[in-house]
Image (spheres, rainbow, N blue to C red):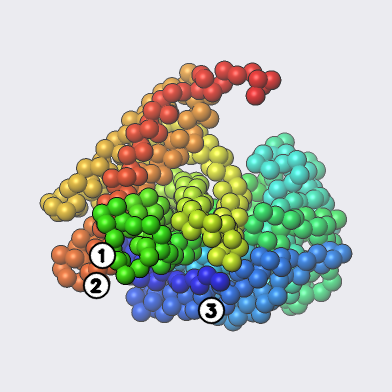
Amino acid sequence: MPTYRAPLTDMQFLLRDVFKAEELFAAMPDTKEVTEDLIDAILEAAAKMATGVLSPLNQSGDREGCHFDAGVVTTPKGFVEAFRAYAEGGWPGLTGDVDYGGQGMPTVLSALLEEMAFAANSSFALYAMLTTGVTHSLSRLGSTELKEKYLPRMYDGTWSGSMCLTEAHAGTDLGMIRTSAVPTADGNYELSGTKIFITAGEHDLTENIIHLVLAKLPDAPAGPRGISLFLVPKFLVDDAGNTGELNKVKCGSIEHKMGIRASATCVLNFEAAKGYLVGELNQGMSNMFTLMNYARLSMGIQGNGLADASYQVASAYAKERLQGRAASGPLQADQAADPIIVHPDVRRMLLTMRSNIVAGRALSMYAAMQLDISRFHPEPAARNKAEQLVALLIPVQKAYCTDRGFEACVLGQQVLGGHGYIAEWGLEQNVRDARIAQIYEGANGVQALDLMGRKTVRGKGELLRVLVAEMDEFAAGQQGVAAMVAPLQAFEECKRRLIDTTASVIKSAAGNPDQVGAASYAYLELMGLTLYSFMWQRVLAAAFAAMELGQGNQDYCDGLVKTGEFFMRHLLPRSKALVEEIAAGPEVMMALRADQF
């Protein structure tokens, strides 16, 4: 059975040397007590949880799956005890509102906790992640009464959460939902309808499950403008905070899935279930984006986590598996063959995995830190800029990290050859588990449309200009650093391609409505590749600085530099092909009639 090791050295280097997290936290009154020692203690405790509690249940949970019996869902053996340990560790309330029992920690620390959890046991991580997303939304949008009643029990892990958006006929197009919310005499609502694909919608891990549900009032405006957000508990809660009778929410079935088999994916039937309005009427879609930003960030993190879990197995295997001889001659003459890590193609796969993992982790942390700035920073201008960056970064981080994460899981399988296809090594499970991250919380093609259409063409490239200003400021600070000349030059060329391509698409979209959809996915890939290159500039700068000063682990920094050079020379050139793909336009793509497919 594979053994996951939390990449604490990588995480601490990124926090301390690359992003100067302690300096940022010190500049914000609500996070000034988050010191390096506290950060290290949190990460080390999270690593123990992931490796000691969650990882041992990963394969057994996958084999057993969840059980469904007359509306009752039972999680695999060991999951209840694991969730109890998770709650006792205080993890559900890590980033929670301190006024209601949360710990008020920055989101970037939660992001690293989630990466460890997803790498160790993606199915388990989903139960925890959904609760965090629900509490973020409730903390920001809920009334004082709702927050007082529900947040403390969710922060201490007694209760958990789910979000209920999708219906059988309405996936991406949520304006088509039919779930109704009828006002009642007490000022609340009765919800009726059916939701599908509800992660953690029913299970045995907690005493109560708090659902956030999208629904429409009978007289609501048509389409997405008529959607409202409601809190619907599994068990009703009295004024003293005690659970009472079962609400009229029933689990109709659970799905049988390709992966994340220990995560209960439910059909939920609401039959005049009692619900409470969260936020304002008819503002459900915009309110749900509060939750979705965190959920989509988490999906990108899932891709990073599973990629790293696969890399750990593949790199260890490549150093031990004897097969063939090095092209330059035998390196282990006393053995029957050399380890496969001597072969360039194996190194290509491992370096592709490693270089994308480092960049993906850095991008996820960068996005999470923008969420922290938007939440904690005392200056309105800083909060506004961070919100603009979040709007641009989240669709890219979600889609690009999950695409590269799945690719890494497949590459890891390939490194192991036939053994990668065998269940005991764990890589075939990682492939199955990683695949869903490209689909849920907004399929990656939808993220690309959001980026290209709403965030770029409709906004005339304003958000990109905010990001480019960040890039230019960093590059200006590296002028005169000899080691950074070559990587910065390659990055600047890629950035220029992105800027020019953006202007070209904005111009051509004005005369051809298909241009946005035709360009969207390649544009997202170009944006993601550019952002990964930007992350590598920051990593390389920190590594070169540490080596120049003789600080830290010099061999580790040297390995980072070599990995970054691989990315810049072997992966970044793909930006040229993406520019050509975008320039090809929609004409050929739209030429076939439907019956010709």
User: In 3D space, how far apart are the residues under numbered discs 1 and 3 (Cα atoms)?
Assistant: 28 Å
Q: Nearer the viewer, mark 3 or mark 2?
A: 3
Which residue is identified by label 1?
557
Which residue is identified by label 3?
52
- Indicate left or right for 50 with 432 as reference: left
SS at badge 3? helix
Judge by depth and name the residue closer to the eye, 289 or 596: 596
Question: Percent x, y for residue 48?
Answer: 49, 79
- Residue 537 visible: no
Whether residues under marks 2 and 1 lie with C-beta atoms below 8 angstroms apart, the answer is: yes
Judge by depth and name the residue closer to the eye, 349 or 344: 344
User: In 3D space, how far apart are the residues under numbered discs 2 and 1 (Cα atoms)?
Assistant: 8 Å
Identify the residue at image location x=48%, y=53%. Answer: 414
Q: Quadrant of the N terminus?
A: bottom right
SS at badge 1? helix
User: In 3D space, how far apart are the residues under numbered discs 3 and 2 (Cα atoms)?
Assistant: 28 Å
Which residue is identified by label 2?
552
The disc labelled 3 sits on which kind of residue?
Gly
